[in-house]
Each structure stands twice: as C-alpha cells, then as structure tokens.
Amino acid sequence: MICDNYAAHKHAAVRAWLATNPRITLHFTPAGCSWLNLVECFFSIITRQAIRRGSYPSVRQLTATIGAFIDHWNDHPRPFAWTKNADEPPSTPRPAK
C-alpha cells in the first residue's frame, strides 16, 4: 500500500494491525512530494469538477454530490497519465482522455 507521510499511517495501532497482516506492506512517498500522491490529485479533480462552483445548504447535500461524482467516476474509470518524465520538474498527473 502506498501512503503519504501523514502521521496516522505510522500510528502504533496501524503498526500493530500490520504486524497481524504480514501480506500488507506500507510504502511511503517521499516527504514534500504530494504530487506523487494520486489521492490528492483525485481530491483536486473532485474539487474542480464537482464542488467548487456548487452551493450546498447542508453537509448531507455536499456528501451526496461527492458520492454521485465518485459513482460516475467509478462507472467511467480512466487511468492517470503522467505528463512529464523523471528528469523534468514535477507536474500533476491528469486522467487520460
């Protein structure tokens, strides 16, 4: 499992669970490389495409909007395509068109 360096991933309870599940190994992205974390990229996509210009009178409505976006995304999955090679400065990966 690939994780960022968020402290919760290194918590004693997580380490204890990992000790009882030896098939699972955590691999951490380098510190300061959030652009490698595709979860953050996906959150950015949700923000831009589903949330930013909306008006949500309740948390329930916001949650429903996010859920609908994720359902649609899962029904029409696209792989992420890196736009630069390893020798170029970082960029944000975008879903393939």
Image (spheres, rainbow, N blue to C red):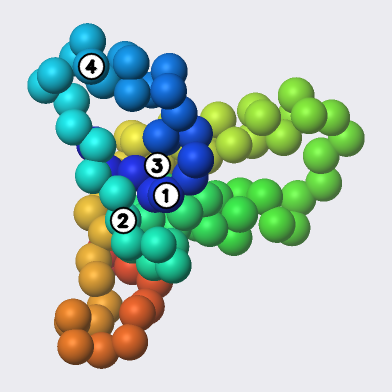
- Alpha carbon separation for disc pair 1 and 2: 7 Å
Q: Mark 1 points at which residue?
A: 5
Give the structural element (helix, strand or loop) at label 2. loop
Image position of 84 with respect to 38: above or below = below
Of 35 and 61, which appears nearest the observer?
Answer: 35
The answer to which image quadrant residue 79 occupies is: bottom left
Q: How crowded is mark 2: few (under 14 residues within 10 Å), some or many (20 or more)?
A: some
**What is the residue that sits farthest to the bottom in this orientation?**
88
Q: Which residue is pictured at 24% across the width and 82% down the height?
A: 84
Image position of 97 with respect to 54: above or below = below
Q: Name the residue under label 2.
A: 29
Image x and y of residue 14, in percent: 38, 22
Q: Mark 4 points at which residue?
A: 19
Image position of 83 with respect to 11: above or below = below
- Alpha carbon separation for disc pair 1 and 4: 19 Å
Residue type, mark 2 in image: Thr
Image position of 35 with respect to 74: above or below = below
Instruction: Say which quadrant the N terminus sits in.
Output: top left
Give the structural element (helix, strand or loop) at label 4. helix
Q: Mark 3 points at which residue?
A: 73
Of 70 and 26, which appears nearest the observer?
Answer: 26
- Alpha carbon separation for disc pair 2 and 3: 25 Å
Taking 46 as reference, is 2 left or right? left
Residue type, mark 3 in image: Trp
Q: Are marks 1 and 2 in contact (CB under 8 Å)?
A: yes
